[in-house]
Image (tube, rainbow, N blue to C red):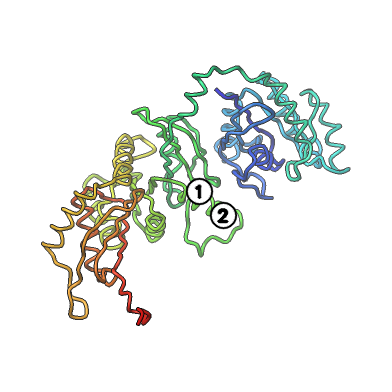
């Protein structure tokens, strides 16, 4: 098991910049505005000769209860409780503050090993902060510049010394790691305040993500490894809410939106969380359409279902189904799971629907079975006439899965009308149980060698 290193400090001292630098890639959003990081973010890293798990945290603040700042600090405290080593970061240019002193004393009481990191220590402006840091009683401070990459040799040495040498592993262990189980990549997407983070917390069984009545709490895309009730490994990604593009003007929100879209593209399955009191609005359809365009399978989680009166639930489902049939026909049969993330009602139905959809998304159909189906489908409903002549569709094959992609070959098949192509797609979906996943259909015609006028002479 790799040791866990947690990065803490008050807001805007450069924790996320340090996290990105140690992880050697940009994972956390960095912005001049204080308090950008609100949830713990994890990443594997190598520091010195040690493989470690890095955790970036929200800023530590003294704040009244029931505020976002207080909930953020509580999340950071939980992370410290998990730490094998804490990197306590202060701002060298700003010098020591009462908050730094308060949280340094708090860390000493926690009894965790701590390395004091003075960030922004480059140049004369940071020298005073390094001198003052000795008074915190946390050992010799390590001056660094996370932005410019200065001082990291000393930091790596200090981390390695604090953690000690890596334990020896035998050959059998190494072979086991080489065959590590690959997780299902599952992204939780939706509009702001639909209940995405509450759903993630419910699935994880802990208050891992910051939640509250305020919309737009989540800013980063937060990936968490998790095993479901059947013990299957999942990389669960909570994301920031997606609003209409025209409403996104703040630079920080633009960065959050970019992170969410990237998480969607990297996912295999997308759970689109809908608010049952206002389901499938225009923005929900836009998100679903984006996921389909990217070839991602979708499961709809109709959240806050417990707030819909029992006598109105049948009508609410019919309205949603009708909206899907008219506006999202390319994902016919998309699974809908009604649940309440807050109370837990119906949440146990979500992962079975996800795994069923994942299996359909991975489906491969044998060419023989596919062509027997193709012959039946084209016999029942022959291809139409185009320019007075019937198209000759000869055979079909599956080019790939994830999503299922099929190629039809035949004379002038590229001229196949859209309506007939939809008939074939819907027949494939129904006959091979590919409900709710994107399907691609490519058409390959027989090229006339004399069409360009250079057939020889």
Residue drawn at (50%, 37%), measured in percent from left and top? 209
Say which quadrant the N terminus sits in. Answer: top right
Position of 252 compared to 424: left or right? right
Instruction: Find residue 21 and report its horizontal and vertical position in percent.
Output: 68, 40
Mark 2 and mark 1: Cα distance apart in space: 9 Å
Say which quadrant the C terminus sits in. Answer: bottom left
Marking on residue 253:
2
Q: How many marks?
A: 2
Residue drawn at (64%, 44%), measured in percent from left and top? 35
Position of residue 358 relative to residue 179, above or below, is below
- Which residue bears the numbered disc 1? 240
Position of residue 96 relative to residue 177, above or below, is below
Please state which of residues 376 and 23 is positioned toward the viewer in this rendering.
376
Please state which of residues 17 and 195 is positioned toward the viewer in this rendering.
17
Please state which of residues 355 and 213 is positioned toward the viewer in this rendering.
355
Mark 2 or 1, nearer chain start: 1
Instruction: Find residue 227 and report its horizontal and vertical position in percent.
Output: 41, 30
Position of 155 compared to 396: left or right? right
Instruction: Find residue 356 and report its horizontal and vertical position in percent.
Output: 29, 41
Observer able to see residue 60: yes
Residue drawn at (50%, 51%), measured in percent from left and top? 262
């Amino acid at each position: 098991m790799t040791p866990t290193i947690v990065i803490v400090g008050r807001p805007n001292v450069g924790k996320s910049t340090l996290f990105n630098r140690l992880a050697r890639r940009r994972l956390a959003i960095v912005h001049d505005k204080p308090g950008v990081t609100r949830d713990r973010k994890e990443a594997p890293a190598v520091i010195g000769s040690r493989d470690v798990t890095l955790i970036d945290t929200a800023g530590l603040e003294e704040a009244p209860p029931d505020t976002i700042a207080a909930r953020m600090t509580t999340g950071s405290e939980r992370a410290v409780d998990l730490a094998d080593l804490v990197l306590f970061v202060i701002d060298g240019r700003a010098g020591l503050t009462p908050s730094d002193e308060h949280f340094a004393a708090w860390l000493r009481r926690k009894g965790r090993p701590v390395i004091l990191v003075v960030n922004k220590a480059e140049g004369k402006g940071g020298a005073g902060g390094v001198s003052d840091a000795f008074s915190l009683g946390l050992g010799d401070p390590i001056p660094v510049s996370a932005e410019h990459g200065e001082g990291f040799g000393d930091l790596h040495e200090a981390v390695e010394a604090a953690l000690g040498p890596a334990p020896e592993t035998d050959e059998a262990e190494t072979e086991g790691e080489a065959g590590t189980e690959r997780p299902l990549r599952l992204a939780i997407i939706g509009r702001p305040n639909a209940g995405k983070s509450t759903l993630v917390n419910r699935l994880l069984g802990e208050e891992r993500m910051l939640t509250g009545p305020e919309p737009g709490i989540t800013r980063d895309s937060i990936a968490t490894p998790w095993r479901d009730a059947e013990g299957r490994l999942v990389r669960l990604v909570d994301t920031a809410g997606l609003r209409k593009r025209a409403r996104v003007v703040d630079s920080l929100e633009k960065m959050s939106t970019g992170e969410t879209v990237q998480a969607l593209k990297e996912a295999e399955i997308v759970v689109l969380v809908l608010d049952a009191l206002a389901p499938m609005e225009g923005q929900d359809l836009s998100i679903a359409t984006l996921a389909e365009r990217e070839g991602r399978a979708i499961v709809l989680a109709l959240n806050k279902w417990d707030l819909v009166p029992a006598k109105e639930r049948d009508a609410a489902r019919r309205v949603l189904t009708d909206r899907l049939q008219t506006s999202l026909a390319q994902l016919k049969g998309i699974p809908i799971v009604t649940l309440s993330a807050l109370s837990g009602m119906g949440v146990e139905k979500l992962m079975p629907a996800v795994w069923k959809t994942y299996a359909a998304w991975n489906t491969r159909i044998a060419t023989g079975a596919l062509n027997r189906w193709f012959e039946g489908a084209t016999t029942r409903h022959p291809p139409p006439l185009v320019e007075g002549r019937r198209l000759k569709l000869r055979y079909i094959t599956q080019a790939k899965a994830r999503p299922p992609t099929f190629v039809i070959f035949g004379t002038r098949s590229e001229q196949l009308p859209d309506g007939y192509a939809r008939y074939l797609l819907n027949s494939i979906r129904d006959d091979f149980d590919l409900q709710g996943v994107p399907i691609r259909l490519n058409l390959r015609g027989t090229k006339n060698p004399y069409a360009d006028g250079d057939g020889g002479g």
